[in-house]
Image (cartoon, coloured by chain):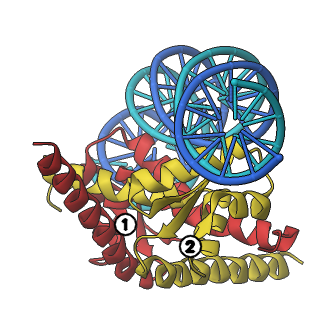
Chain colours: A yellow, B red, C cyan, D blue
DNA sequence: TTCATATGTGGCAATATGGCCACATAGATT
DNA sequence: AATCTATGTGGCCATATTGCCACATATGAA
């Protein structure tokens, strides 16, 4: 098992940043909403029902990570998903969640 | 834009937990190592060079998230990747990183 | 200009996370 | 039994993250 070098470490950090950006329920819900096409901040805001400043900061994190990009039009700012493959990979995440809950269920039954 | 209900919120939380588990460079490096087959903690430990207690806790987080599972054999505990599709989806994450760095490069050139 | 709307930013307090130390435990070896 | 090895846990502290408030900015409307 080789020891990890500096290049590997940097690479892992960059990828982890993207995953971390997706690793928050509010941000994830917004990303899923954006899968249906671009949305303005106001729409995302009413979708998740949090303070607008909170939404704004979450969007900044997603943008910084390269997951979304934005476009200004009049008063509104529209965000869109920058990397389409993300939605496919969320399907994989779902399968992790499902296999985990299956195991939990089995464990509960086992204890029952 | 519909408002998100409780079920959606729980689902987003569960998926975010998985992504958050992957959203740390050390954990990501270990997951990538496990893509090559199961490894004992001692191997992962020398791979990432951190205190063994730190490794142990990171592995517990991955296990809790359902990303890995473990198997004890004598003194050693072997971890393996529970959900193979994760490696495919890391390819997508890489593409996010790459398109981001391309944009950064373009921005730097634009300023130059 | 004055006001309203949409969005972003600074700051602060609460909470979560990460890493290291010391210690605990389980299994192997002598 | 005494000891060693591999792994896990509890505790502590430093740092990061979150969420809300207040305020700032930009654009459009009156």
Q: Is residue D24 above or below residue D1?
A: above
**Chain containing mark 2:** A
The residue labelled by disc 1 is B31
Q: At which x and y percent is residue B37?
A: 31, 78
Q: At which x and y percent is residue C24?
A: 60, 36
Which is nearer the eye, B32 or B8?
Answer: B8
**Chain containing mark 1:** B
Residue B92, quarter of the rendered image: bottom left
Mark 1 neighbour density, 10 Å: few (under 14) some (14–19) many (20 or more): many
Left or right position of A68 against C3: left
For residue A51, the mark is none
Q: Is residue C30 above or below residue B14?
A: above
Which is nearer the eye, A86 or C1?
Answer: C1
Q: Residue at 31%, 50% (x, y): give it.
A: A13
Left or right position of A112 against B79: right
Q: Let me know if residue B84 appears in the view.
A: no
User: Are the numbered discs 2 and 1 placed on the same chain, yes or no?
Assistant: no
Q: Let me know if residue B15 appears in the view.
A: yes
The residue labelled by disc 2 is A38
Secondary element at image label 2: loop
Estimate the spatial distance between the alpha carbons at disc 2 and disc 1, rounded to whole Å.
Answer: 33 Å
Q: At which x and y percent is residue C16?
A: 65, 41
Image quadrant occupied by the C terminus of chain A: bottom right
Between marks 2 and 1 in the image, the one whose residue lies nearer the viewer = 2
Residue D15, quarter of the rendered image: top left
How many numbered marks appear? 2
Q: Residue at 81%, 69% (x, y): give it.
A: B4
Q: Residue at 31%, 40% (x, y): give it.
A: B50
Secondary element at image label 1: helix
Q: Is residue D15 above or below residue B73?
A: above
Which is nearer the eye, A87 or D16?
Answer: A87
Mark 2 neighbour density, 10 Å: few (under 14) some (14–19) many (20 or more): some
């Amino acid at each position: 098992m080789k020891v990890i070098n500096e290049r590997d470490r940097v690479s892992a950090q960059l990828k982890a940043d993207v995953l971390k950006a997706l690793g928050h329920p509010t941000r994830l819900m917004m990303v899923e909403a954006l899968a249906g096409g671009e949305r303005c901040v106001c729409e995302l805001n009413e979708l998740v029902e949090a303070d607008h400043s909170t939404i704004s900061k979450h969007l900044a994190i997603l943008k910084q990570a390269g997951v979304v990009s934005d476009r200004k039009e009049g008063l509104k700012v529209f965000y869109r998903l920058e990397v389409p493959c993300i939605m496919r990979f969320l399907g994989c995440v779902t399968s992790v969640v499902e296999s985990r809950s299956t195991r939990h269920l089995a464990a509960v039954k086992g204890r029952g």
